[in-house]
Amino acid sequence: MSQQPPDRSTASPPARPDASMSLLTNVMDHSLDDGYAEATAKRKADGGAAMPRTLKAKLGLAAGLVLAALVVTLGAAEARVSAPVLAKEREELIERIDKETSAADKLESQVDKARDDVGERQRKALEKHGGDQGQLVALLAGATAVKGPGVKLVVDDAKDTDQGGGGPRETSGFTDTGRVRDRDMQRVVNGLWQSGAEAISINGQRLTALSAIRAAGDAILVDNKPLVPPYTVLAVGDGKRLSTAFEDSADGQYLRALKDTFDIRTSMSVQDEVRLPAAPSLIVRTAEPKAADTGSGAADTGKGTS
């Protein structure tokens, strides 16, 4: 009976733990690319990587090193020499700036002094031409600071300034929005004057009989000076009477309509004392009566006599 040959097959070797990371293993084992390795070996075989062996090559290398050192030394020396020059120029520039700043401050002080002198002369002129009522004239003209009882009226834009619609602003070229306009402030000021105010200021800007309230874009100008909301209007006068008269006036009802229609925020309160500064600049104008015509002849009618 034939026997089967013994099974000579052996079990397969166990898999390497890093078999799944063959790419990473290859990179680690061959960190240098084969092309670079071959090029390095060729240079070594040709002697290119070794130091120069001949005296001429050594002298050339030494000369190159000396030249490089000389260039570096000259650059450092030049930088060291130019540093004080730059520092000196910087100090001179700072000195010039300080000098010009001092000159500008001096001129500004002279302007303020001249403005105060002009204002004092204007006040004296008002008192002179005002006679016995010189102080009253100066007060009404805004030439002097004033304090006393009055009212405080605050007018501010609506929270939502994009509102629109009809209302008291139905005038050509006048936008119906929640922003306070120059025309609104004009009516407020005129209403306070008409209600008995003796002196008025807006955001600390004293108003006179020649003051102008205008607009530049969305900004309100008082005598060409821009104001920002909220607009605080102070008026000197009998507080309760002034407040009641203004609220009952047409301008007070106009302001109430703005509040109801455009949500413009307003508030008025009676104050025991308010302080208003003098107007920054005044234009003094005086008028004198013309002398009567003393001519004895009758008026020429152009008609002959018989």
Image (cartoon, rainbow, N blue to C red):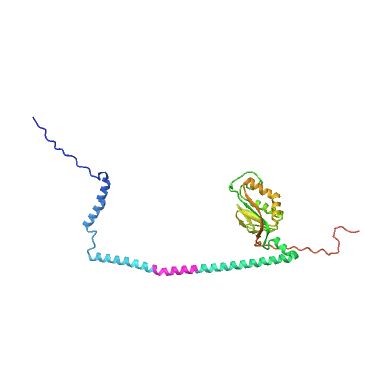
Residue 158 in the image: state x and y as whole percent: 60, 48
* Residue at the far left in the pictured view: 1
Left or right: where 303 falls relative to 141:
right
Q: Residue at x 47, y 69 (%)?
A: 91
Residue 271 occupies quadrant: bottom right
Residue 241 occupies quadrant: bottom right
Q: Tell whether position 81 is magenta.
A: yes
Q: Tell whether position 293 is magenta.
A: no
Q: How many numbered circles does the render carry?
A: 0
Quadrant for the C terminus, please. bottom right
Q: Residue at x 67, y 52 (%)?
A: 188
Residue 252 in view here: yes
Q: Is residue 2 above or below residue 10?
A: above
Residue 234 in the image: state x and y as whole percent: 66, 56
Q: Residue at x 59, y 67 (%)?
A: 109
Residue numbers of the magenta segment: 79-94
* Residue at the far top in the pictured view: 1
Q: Residue at x 25, y 65 (%)?
A: 58
Q: Nearer the viewer, residue 38 or 258?
A: 258
Residue 76 occupies quadrant: bottom left
Residue 157 in the image: state x and y as whole percent: 60, 50
Q: Nearer the viewer, residue 103 or 20?
A: 20
Residue 285 in the image: state x and y as whole percent: 71, 62
